[in-house]
Image (cartoon, helix red, strand yellow):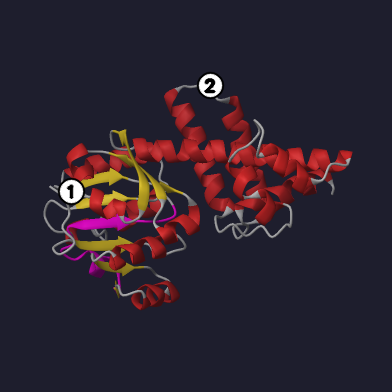
Amino acid sequence: MSIDPSSARIAFLGLGKMGLPMASRLVAGGFTVVGFDPSPAAAAAFAAAGGRAAASARDAAEQANVAVTMLPDGKAVRAVLAGPEGVAGCLAPGAIVIDMSSSAPVGTRDLAGELAQAGIVLIDAPVSGGVKRAVNGTLAIMVGGDEAAAASVRPLLARMGTAIFETGPVGSGHAMKALNNYVSAAGLTAACEALRIGARFGLDPALMTDILNVSTGRNNSTEVKLKPFVIPKTYASGFSLALMAKDLRTADELARHEGVPAPLSHAVAALWQEALEELGTEADHTAIDAFLANRQGA
């Protein structure tokens, strides 16, 4: 079974920086999508892209056979899906919910069990790649959950991403996403520290970046974040420090839940939480560099 664009009715819940271009790509691919976001501007932008913007989440979900959530965290996902005011009761019988948010994997597993009692299948399919790749449909997507359900929505996922990985049972996609962002944040922190140490010694940060990118220190941050956002101090990558800090807490909590000693994970999560408390929720995640500069006194 696969999702036929001509018959699928998709509710897309969450039209933020990532959700809006993702939902818009589904519309452009011929899918019928009803979206909801509490922001009037986001709803208007989705309508301008050809989708229908609903007045409420329940309105968007009415008789949908697929619901996609792209929300800040698992608590927000649970709030919109479960409970007396949740949308689960509005969905068509046998509907599939695809949680593409960055949720906590243990909570995802619990929610999937609750929804299964109502005949709804939950799969987790968080993404990586940022706004630019959401716009051009080249996201990496990590899919956890029932294999048949995942296969049935693959045409939908393929409109949003080009690297689709089935990671295992429900919750495993969210676990992979949190661990990926832990590795990403650790790499960014290390790169920013290295530039500051080198600059103090007299090295040119741009030259350092060029050398890192043809050497063993190369990582995603050295390739795509240092020159556009860190060195000029624009700090405008489009992904918030608050969301990164949340993902790091998720990775750290997963390590604790599984009983795996992870001292670097604990240290990185604590550092980014301190940065969040100092810089605030509006800060871009590349502003971790500004936080390090404040500690250095630069």
Left or right: 100 with respect to 11?
A: right
Q: Is residue 280 magenta?
A: no
Among numbered discs 1 and 2, the one appearing first in the sequence: 1
Percent from the top left, x then y, of residue 47? 34, 76
What is the tally of numbered marks visible in this picture? Answer: 2
Considering every residue shown, the one lying at the far front of the view is: 214
Left or right: 100 with respect to 204?
A: left
Residue 209: quadrant of the picture: top right
Percent from the top left, x then y, of residue 97? 25, 51
- In this view, the residue in front, 134 or 11, is 134
Q: Which residue is mark 1?
A: 120
Count neighbours of disc 2 (C-alpha within 10 A) and say few if under 14, some if 14 to 19, many if 20 or more. Answer: few
Callout 1 amino acid? Ile
At 30% across and 52% down in the image, what residue appears? 158
Count neighbours of disc 1 (C-alpha within 10 A) and say few if under 14, some if 14 to 19, many if 20 or more. Answer: many
Left or right: 274 with respect to 129?
A: right
Q: Is disc 1 placed on a helix, strand or loop?
A: loop
- In this view, the residue in front, 119 or 180, is 180
* Mark-to-mark CA distance, 1 and 2: 36 Å
At 38% across and 68% down in the image, what residue appears? 37
Callout 2 amino acid? Pro
What residue span does the magenta drawing correspond to? 54-72
| Residue 82 visible, this orientation | no
Percent from the top left, x then y, of residue 241? 59, 52
Residue 258 drawn above or below residue 8: above
- In this view, the residue in front, 109 or 43, is 43
Q: Which residue is mark 2?
A: 261
Q: Is residue 58 magenta?
A: yes
